[in-house]
Image: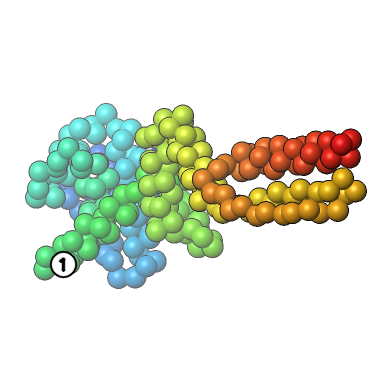
Amino acid sequence: MAADAERFLHQIRGAGSQPLDSAGWLQRAGLNIRKASDAQHLEAIALAYATYIRISRSPLRAAMMAELETLSGRKRSRTTHDLHLIVERFVSYGGETPAERLAARKLISRDVRAIQHLEAAKILPSRVQALAATPGQGLHAWAREHAVAKRVSSSPLGAIAAARQAKTEARQRALIHEVTITTRRPEGSRKAQRRYVITGLLGAEIVGLRRRLKGLEARTARKAQLG
């Protein structure tokens, strides 16, 4: 992963670019890629992803992130991820009006979640653009995948199973079942038939009830024949 990120960065930046650990490179990062199209935006995200991998494995990570925080012009909060600072160096999200700034924050959050999914799925930075071209893939899809995985991982397995079971039982109890009770004369002809509407029971409970009623009818018929 790290080797691919390094090759990808040098391939895009060129062999003559500044060392990736230099402050000068950090200041220039993102100035060459602007959000002019979806394709350029995706290339910028791939670059941000490769840069994130490179910085994460650098012994100078703390210093580089501090430099990026300074370049961003704002203090990072408890929820600020390294990727928030990195993607903003590669994509011009805009945001002059309050509405534009809100839209920009949402877009940054989506891009960060997308990269986090790529990292968790062990997708190489050099493969990001090709993967995005396949059906069902892309920044929106990757961001959703990360959000789902985060929700699942934050819940104990027992709680997830219990929630699913409760949901299934609630659907079953909401169903309306019709149960028929038939009484017969000794010769076997039907004497009477009554229908009952039942709700609030699980599927297994309804099956058991029908089985017991059928057994009761059989015993009643036998008693009638003996009598």
Which residue sits at x=25%, y=41%? Answer: 82
Q: Nearer the viewer, residue 194 or 122?
A: 194
Instruction: Provide residue 143's location: percent of width, then percent of height.
Output: 38, 52
Please give left or right for residue 103 compared with residue 218 in the image: left
Which residue sits at x=29%, y=38%? Answer: 55
Q: For the N terminus, give its image quadrant.
A: top left
Q: How dense is the environment of label 1, judged by Cα within 10 Å: few (below 14), some, or many (20 and up)?
A: few
Instruction: Provide residue 56's location: percent of width, then percent of height.
Output: 31, 35
Q: Nearer the viewer, residue 204 or 145?
A: 204
Instruction: Look at the numbered disc 1 and give the secondary structure of its residue.
Output: helix
Please give left or right for residue 89 compared with residue 213 in the image: left
Q: Which residue of the protein is positioned furthest toward the front in this rendering?
A: 227
- The relative height of residue 1 versus residue 41 in the rendered view (above or below) is above
Please give left or right for residue 94 compared with residue 120 in the image: left
Q: Nearer the viewer, residue 216 or 107?
A: 216
Instruction: Provide residue 74's location: percent of width, then percent of height.
Output: 9, 48
Q: Is residue 54 visible?
A: yes
Can you tell which quarter of the image residue 41 is in? Answer: bottom left
Q: Is residue 7 visible?
A: no
Can you tell which quarter of the image residue 149 is in? Answer: top left
Which residue sits at x=47%, y=40%? Answer: 166
At label 1, the amino acid type is Ala
Instruction: Provide residue 72's location: percent of width, then percent of height.
Output: 13, 50
Which residue is identified by label 1?
Answer: 99
